[in-house]
């Protein structure tokens, strides 16, 4: 199981807001059922099989390019842990459990 965070930044658009492009790319996520995802203010977290994650990232990038974008800056962070199964919730809960109370 892998967890990845993807940030897509279209460059050279006419507006400073990129939410329209991100929404179009996020439609790819809505149409699939292999990878869990969580939108956040700075990107999208993807959780699932690493091959499925890479495939979805490629599709999301292509979706942005198909909407009159000629340059796209993408940031991908991947945590590919293979010694045990875990989820995004597990990662967050692990930190919460260690907080001083």
Image (cartoon, helix red, strand yellow):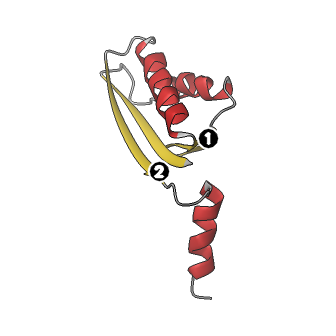
- Give the camera-side residue of 15 and 89: 89
Look at the image and tell me in which quarter the C terminus lies. Answer: bottom right
Q: Earlier in the sequence, mark 1 or mark 2?
A: 1
Res 37 label: 1
What percent of the width, then of the height, locates residue 24? 55, 21
Q: Of 18 and 95, which appears nearest the observer?
A: 95
Whether residue 16 appears in this view of the structure is: yes
Could you say where residue 46 lies in the image, as x and y percent from the top left? Answer: 55, 42
Q: Position of residue 27 (x, y in %)?
A: 61, 23
Q: Which residue is mark 2?
A: 80
The residue lying at 43 percent from left, 39 percent from top is 7
Foreground mark, 1 or 2, reads 2
Mark 1 surroundings within 10 Å by alpha-carbon count, few (fewer than 14), some (14 through 19), many (20 or more): many
Tell me: residue 88, above or below residue 6: below
Q: Is residue 70 above or below residue 11?
A: above
How many residues crowd mark 2 within 10 Å: few (<14), some (14–19), many (20+)? Answer: some
Q: CA distance from mark 1 to mark 2?
A: 16 Å
Task: Tell me the element at label 2.
Answer: strand
SS at badge 1: strand
* Residue at the outermost bottom position: 101
Q: Name the side, left or right, on which 30 lies relative to 67.
A: right
Residue at image coords 52%, 48%: 3
Task: State the residue at coordinates (47%, 45%).
Answer: 5
User: Looking at the image, which residue is at 39% across and 41% down?
Assistant: 76
> Where, by quadrant of the figure, is residue 84 drawn?
bottom right
């Amino acid at each position: 199981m892998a967890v990845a965070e993807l940030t897509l930044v279209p460059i050279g658009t006419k507006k400073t807001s990129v939410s329209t492009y991100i929404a179009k790319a996020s439609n790819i996520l809505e149409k699939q059922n292999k990878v869990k995802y969580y939108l956040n203010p700075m990107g999208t977290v993807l959780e699932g099989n690493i091959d499925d994650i890479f495939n979805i990232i490629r599709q999301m990038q292509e979706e942005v390019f198909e909407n009159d974008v000629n340059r796209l800056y993408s940031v991908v962070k991947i945590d590919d842990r293979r010694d045990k199964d875990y989820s995004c919730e597990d990662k967050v809960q692990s930190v919460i459990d260690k907080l001083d109370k």
